[in-house]
Image: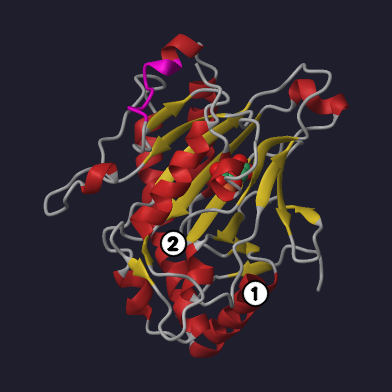
């Protein structure tokens, strides 16, 4: 099996059946063999991505006291600012081991309470908008709209690929709790840093759409060979990976691949400040994920699965 992250051009998906079938075949292979792929041919304007990166960089450069004003309520409410070392992603995936907190800070956004939607114990919660930079809120809103559209296209491709009616996937995301996260991994002057700045984990939901700037010390995925391979989206590409829900839904036909963010080499460490923008597409909290006959996993609601992992990542936090 090749140790490479496949690139799939999803342009013109849905326009003719031969083209769509070719995209579906490539997607199935990528989801079976690597659980990660890069896409081109999407409709997300590069300028909206660039604007959001610029706003994110400005936010993370603010003094800590100012960033802390946007801190979220904590517990299981995934909103607002989480300071440096405030999350330990590996603890959500390997709860029995001791892990060190991730060397990152971040801002989380998600669905707000809306008419006709019950709050569901915090899955729908008000966003916390930083006062500065002023352009952050419109940039987040525009980018989130693009991500929702792209995620729906990807779910349609998944349904065609797996030969299941698309309403099975789409209906499970009607009240989705998809989240947008801005992450900053600051540069470091430590002579002996941890080997990773984001611990190995699998994502929780159905699929993740990620872009990052090109600082060294970036994202790696652990492929089935056991090798860790760099995942570097080129400008205009997004990295897509499968979250925990797809192996459940496909009874392990597809893999939720562990990934991590490594430390930069010593020579680059002082200028290794890195930003990523991550959209987690996540089913409705009360969606019951089950593949039908003889499931490999006990039935669970997505909300329960999410909350278990989220709370585990917070328990080993070293944030103030
Ligand atoms: O920042 C990255 O490149 C990866 C982040 C990630 O995997 C996550 O937040 O789940
Ligand atoms: Fe992840």
- Please provide percent x and percent y for residue 190: 78, 18
Q: Residue furthest right?
A: 267
Q: Nearer the viewer, mark 1 or mark 2?
A: 1
Residue at the spot 50% in from the left edge and 23% down from the top edge: 83
- Per the rendering, the mark at residue 151 is 2
Question: Is residue 7 visible in the rendered structure shown here?
Answer: yes
Image vertical order of residue 96 relative to residue 22, above or below: above
Residue at the spot 87% in from the left edge and 25% down from the top edge: 267
Question: Is residue 15 visible in the rendered structure shown here?
Answer: no
- Determine which quarter of the picture holds residue 310: top left
- Magenta region, mostly helix, strand or loop? loop
Whether residue 224 sits left or right of residue 161 in the image: it is right
Between residues 306 and 217, which one lies in front from this camera angle? Answer: 306
Mark 1 and 2 residues: CB-CB less than 8 Å, in contact?
no
Residue at the spot 78% in from the left edge and 25% down from the top edge: 193
Was residue 303 drawn as part of the magenta stretch in this picture? no
Q: Which residue lies under the disc numbered 1?
A: 32
Image vertical order of residue 163 relative to residue 1, above or below: below
- Please provide percent x and percent y for residue 246: 50, 68
Cα distance in 3D space between marks 1 and 2: 19 Å
Report the quarter where the N terminus lies.
Answer: bottom right
Q: Specify start and end residues of the magenta stretch as a single range.
A: 67-74
Whether residue 137 sits left or right of residue 226 in the image: it is left
Q: Is mark 1 on a helix, strand or loop?
A: helix
- Please provide percent x and percent y for residue 76: 36, 38
């Amino acid at each position: 099996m090749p140790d490479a992250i496949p690139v799939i051009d999803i342009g013109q998906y849905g326009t003719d059946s031969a083209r769509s079938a070719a995209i579906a075949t490539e997607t199935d292979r990528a989801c079976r063999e690597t659980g990660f792929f890069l896409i081109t041919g999407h409709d997300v304007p590069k300028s909206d991505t660039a604007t959001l990166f610029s706003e994110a960089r400005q936010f993370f450069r603010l003094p800590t006291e100012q960033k802390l004003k946007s801190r979220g309520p904590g517990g299981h409410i995934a909103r607002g600012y989480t300071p440096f070392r405030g999350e330990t992603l590996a603890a959500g995936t390997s709860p029995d081991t001791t892990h060190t907190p991730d060397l990152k800070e971040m801002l989380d956004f998600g669905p707000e309470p809306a008419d006709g939607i019950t709050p569901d114990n915090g899955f729908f919660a008000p966003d916390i908008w930083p006062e500065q930079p002023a352009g952050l809120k419109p940039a987040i809103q525009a980018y989130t709209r693009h991500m929702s559209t792209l995620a729906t296209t990807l779910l349609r491709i998944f349904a065609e690929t797996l030969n299941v009616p698309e309403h099975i996937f789409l209906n499970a995301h009607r009240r989705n709790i998809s989240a947008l996260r801005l992450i900053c991994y600051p540069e470091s002057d430590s002579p002996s840093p941890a080997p990773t700045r984001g611990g190995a984990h699998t994502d929780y939901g159905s699929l993740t759409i990620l872009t990052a700037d090109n600082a060294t010390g970036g994202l790696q995925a652990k492929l089935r060979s056991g090798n860790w391979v760099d995942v570097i989206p080129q400008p205009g590409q997004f990295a897509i990976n499968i979250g925990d829900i797809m192996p459940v839904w496909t009874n392990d036909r597809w893999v939720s691949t562990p990934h991590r963010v490594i430390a930069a080499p010593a020579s680059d460490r002082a200028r290794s400040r890195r930003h990523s923008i991550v959209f987690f597409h996540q089913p409705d909290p009360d969606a019951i994920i089950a593949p039908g006959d003889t499931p490999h996993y006990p039935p669970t609601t997505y909300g329960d699965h999410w909350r278990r992992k989220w709370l585990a990542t917070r328990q080993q936090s070293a944030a103030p």
